[in-house]
């Protein structure tokens, strides 16, 4: 299985995996609008890989088969200041 990976021009660290290069027929229009401009990052032979950066390769494969695309969004950012404040509150 091969897929094309595109980077969002609107949202940082957001990637769209599709089954074929420049074919977005399975991607819902609202998602395409939110995604903004697309930049092809790479073509990935999933069958020859056992992992992908932060994406779970098995979830990517299933999503590509079942819905025709996979959207990778960055994990939520941790507010280190808020976390530190909470830790200080527990020490009092």
Image: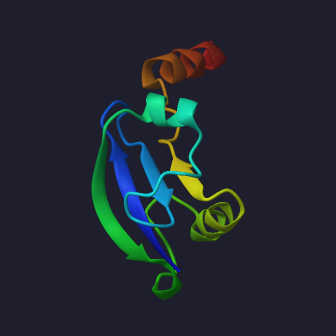
Q: Position of residue 29 (x, y in %)?
A: 55, 35
Which residue of the protein is positioned furthest toward the bottom in this rendering?
48
Specify the quadrant of the image occupied by residue 41.
bottom left
Q: What residue is rendered at 52% in x and 85% in y?
A: 47
- Residue 31 falls in which quadrant of the image? top right
Q: Quadrant of the C terminus?
A: top right
Give the side of residue 13 with respect to residue 68, left or right: left
Q: Is residue 20 left or right of residue 70?
A: left
- The foreground one among 64 and 50 is 64
Q: Is residue 3 above or below residue 49?
A: above
Observer-nearest residue: 22 or 49?
A: 22
Q: Residue at x 61, y 13 (%)?
A: 89
Question: From what the image shows, is residue 23 above or below residue 65?
Answer: above
Number of labels in the image equals: 0
Q: Which residue is rendered at x = 48% and y = 58% of the image? A: 17
> Tell me, what colour scheme is on the image?
rainbow
Q: Position of residue 16 (x, y in %)?
A: 46, 51
| Residue situated in front as seen by the camera: 3 or 28 | 28
Q: In the rendering, at what x and y percent does residue 10 appear? A: 34, 30
Which residue corresponds to the image point at 43% horizontal and 35% vertical from the top-left?
35
Residue 8's image quarter? top left
Q: Is residue 71 above or below residue 48?
A: above
Horizontal relation, residue 23 to residue 71: left or right: left
Residue 50 x %, y %: 52, 81
Instruction: Determine the residue located farthest toward the right in the rendered image.
Output: 66
């Amino acid at each position: 299985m091969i897929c094309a990976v595109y980077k969002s021009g609107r949202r940082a660290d957001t990637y769209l995996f599709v089954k074929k290069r420049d074919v977005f027929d399975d991607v819902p229009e609202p998602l395409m609008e939110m995604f903004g401009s697309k930049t092809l990052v790479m073509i990935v032979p999933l069958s020859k890989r056992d992992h992908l950066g932060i994406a779970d390769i098995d979830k990517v494969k299933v999503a590509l088969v079942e819905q025709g695309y996979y959207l990778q969004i960055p994990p939520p950012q941790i507010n280190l200041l808020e976390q530190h404040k909470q830790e200080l509150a527990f020490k009092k």
